[in-house]
Amino acid sequence: MGRAKRISWILLAGALAVIACDRDKDAAPAQNTSVSASAPASEPLKLPPDDGPPPSVDGDRAMQYVKDIVKFGPRPLGSANHKKVEEYISSHLKGDQVEDDVFTADTPEGKFPVHNIIAKYPGTKEGIIILASHYDTNYPMRKTSYVGANDGASSSGLLLELANHLRGKQREGYSVWLAWDDAEEAMKPDGSGGLPNEMPFSEDSLYGITHLAEKWQADGTLKKVKAFILTDMIGDSDLNVDRDTNSTPWLEDVVYEAAKRLGYQSHFFGRQQEVSDDHLPFVKRGVPSADLIDFTYGYNLAYWHTTEDTIDKLSPRSLQIVGGVVLETLRILDKMDSLPAK
Ligand code: ZN
């Protein structure tokens, strides 16, 4: 994940006020941790009845994918490990309809190949729901043992498991596209996660997903996208998914409803934060978006963007919970008569 945002800066505000000041101007009231899960959308949502068996995700199998990705080691842009992870993801999508979006990103560290991988599972309803996860690890830490077990690998492994649920079935609902997007992380540190402050995140990040949003806007695909659901840092064994204030309220309400229907609501939206993440290019283009991220990771974010972000901090149960909630969210969206346009 990219943006540590603000929260860590707020916590350190006393000591770092001068450095932090230009970041704080767009900071959320990050420590306003009041529960907002019950905050209503502007129009009451008409939700379908809660029926049918709840979806279940194999948390152990998802965890195995996460372990496999982590085993490749650091996977910064331009590295051999990055290439191996690209191949690993693609190898699990054989026979699926896959779009490879490959381009060269011009970054503050030079030009790098970027590879978004999108697997498409057609449905019977007009429209597309995108589930996304970035899979790169950050470039500034390329020479450390940093493997981004939670930050990048957890959600990417979960998406591989979700592909198993979508593959080979006739979807009675929207088409679902899984996007493993690349180059989410900054190339030069923005001061978050204990790294020096070189460039603002907003000017040096989200390369892959921005390219996809631009491309799909240009070719008309974006108009068909009904919702964009991002997962990031969702493997923490102490799972507390935040309600993100950059996300679309009605879509977050549906996610919370899905969590409630599965009995997982205690893991969702106990706190709200403003998060800058891969959903922003879609938010900016008016696509309803939700970022499912647990941005409490170790005491005072001690595991985030540090070499402590390792597999032992994660649990299959957290992957199973988030995977189940994502599938239940899809089921609710599929059954709703219509989805709000914004
Ligand atoms: Zn990150």
Image: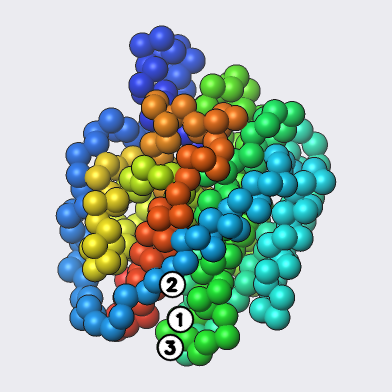
Q: Mark 2 belongs to which amino acid?
A: Lys
Is tag 1's residue or tag 2's residue first in the polypeptide sequence?
1
The residue depicted at 42 percent of the width and 36 percent of the height is 297
Task: Select label 2 or label 3 by which is in front.
Answer: 3
Task: Select label 1 or label 2 by which is in front.
Answer: 1
Circle 3 — which element? strand
Marks 1,2: beta carbons within 8 A: yes
The residue depicted at 51 percent of the width and 40 percent of the height is 312
* Label drawn at residue 226: 2
The residue depicted at 36 percent of the width and 64 percent of the height is 325
Q: Indicate if the residue with disc 3 has its beta carbon within 8 Å of ligand 1.
A: no
Is residue 157 among what the camera can see? yes
Q: Is residue 1 left or right of residue 293?
A: right
Residue 84: x %, y % from top left? 77, 53
Observer-nearest of 209 and 315: 315
Is tag 2's residue or tag 3's residue first in the polypeptide sequence?
3
Q: Mark 3 belongs to which amino acid?
A: Glu
Circle 1 — which element? strand
Circle 2 — which element? strand
Q: Is residue 192 left or right of residue 108?
A: left
State the residue position of label 3. Answer: 172
Q: Is residue 220 left or right of residue 290?
A: right
Characterize the local packing of mark 3: few (<14), some (14-19) or many (20 or more) Cα atoms within 10 angstroms. few
Q: Mark 1 belongs to which amino acid?
A: Tyr
* Label drawn at residue 174: 1
Residue 42: x %, y % from top left? 20, 61
Mark pair 2, 3: CA separation: 15 Å
